[in-house]
Image: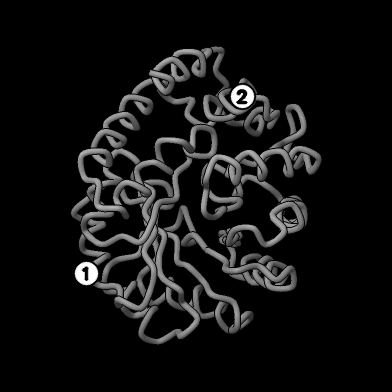
Amino acid sequence: MVTPLEPDSYCVDTTAVPLLVDFLIGKGAKGLFVGGTTGEGIMLAARERKKLHEATMPAVYGRVPVILHVGAQRSDTAVDLARHAAGLGVDAIAAVTPYFYGLPDDGLAAYYQAIVDAVPDTPLFGYDIPQMAVNGISPDLAFRLCDLMPSIAGLKTSNPSIQAVRRILDAVPEDRIVLVGNESAALGALSLGADGLISGLSSAVPEPFVALTQAFSSGEGDEALRQQRLINQLLAMIPAGARLAAIKSILSARGVPVGTPVPTLPRTEAEVWPAMRVILEQ
């Protein structure tokens, strides 16, 4: 889920959050992942992330599960956000690995242990996105977290390599959940055993992602493949270097005003939605 922001600011527009929540649930989304990469979570101050969480939970009103992202560069910030999320009664939390500085598995395990110790009754997803965070969650670390920490619900991996995703799926015990963010290989990941998708583009164009997962779960392989090809066609229409701006622009064109990205991220003047709409209607 993108984060609605006030114009040219790092401040959450809480009035737009319910509109976005209703839009996504109305289009068939089965859950919300809040404040992740597409949600610009790590770009916002902790107080703004808490405002986002506080606005989202009552807007959802228990209609679908919610995962609040609490990951941060510092473990004490992640712990503070985790405690706040647990106090809101969230279904689960997720935490990206600390970023910028390379860390060994022992350091990453200590980070996740600190969060687990702070909120032992709240399910926690590790968040693996090594192409952005420098630190990824290796298959060995994924197994270690699941083995040693009972409240680890599983993993969200946005690794662009389908082979890396396969190794994660092989490592994570069957009683845990793996959600994937590689949109262009979503069907392949589901076929390998992933439990579901968390997609940034689906924050603005959820229809083909909903249709893909429904077709796959119903055993309609040809339709699932058709939806994957449609998704890849839509992905190719996103302007290079301005993915988040394009996603927010699409939402605004669809009647959900979510503003622009934070001031340091690129903008785009491209009108993406009209062409996408034609493809979807066809």
How far apart are the alpha carbons under marks 2 and 1?
A: 39 Å
Is 220 on the left-hand or right-hand side of 94?
left
In percent of the image, x 26 and y 43: which residue is there?
185
The answer, for residue 202, to whether it is visible in the render is yes
Q: Report the quarter where the N terminus lies.
A: top right
The secondary element bearing badge 2 is classed as: loop
The answer, for residue 135, to whether it is visible in the render is no
Q: Is residue 101 above or below residue 177?
A: above
Is 62 on the left-hand or right-hand side of 202?
right
The secondary element bearing badge 1 is classed as: helix
Which of the two marks, 2 or 1, is nearer to us in this view? 2
Give coordinates of residue 79: x percent, y percent. 64, 72
Which residue of the protein is positioned furthest toward the right in this rendering?
A: 15
Give coordinates of residue 215: x percent, y percent. 32, 46
Which residue is the site of mark 2? Answer: 254
Depth check, front residue: 19 or 184: 19
Give coordinates of residue 156: x percent, y percent. 41, 59
Q: Is residue 76 above or below residue 245?
A: below
Which residue is the site of mark 1? Answer: 170
Q: Amino acid at mark 2?
A: Arg
Is 217 on the left-hand or right-hand side of 221?
right
Give coordinates of residue 57: x percent, y percent. 72, 58
In percent of the image, x 75 and y 37: which residue is there?
16
Is 61 on the left-hand or right-hand side of 199?
right
Q: Which badge, 2 or 1, is on the more N-terminal residue?
A: 1
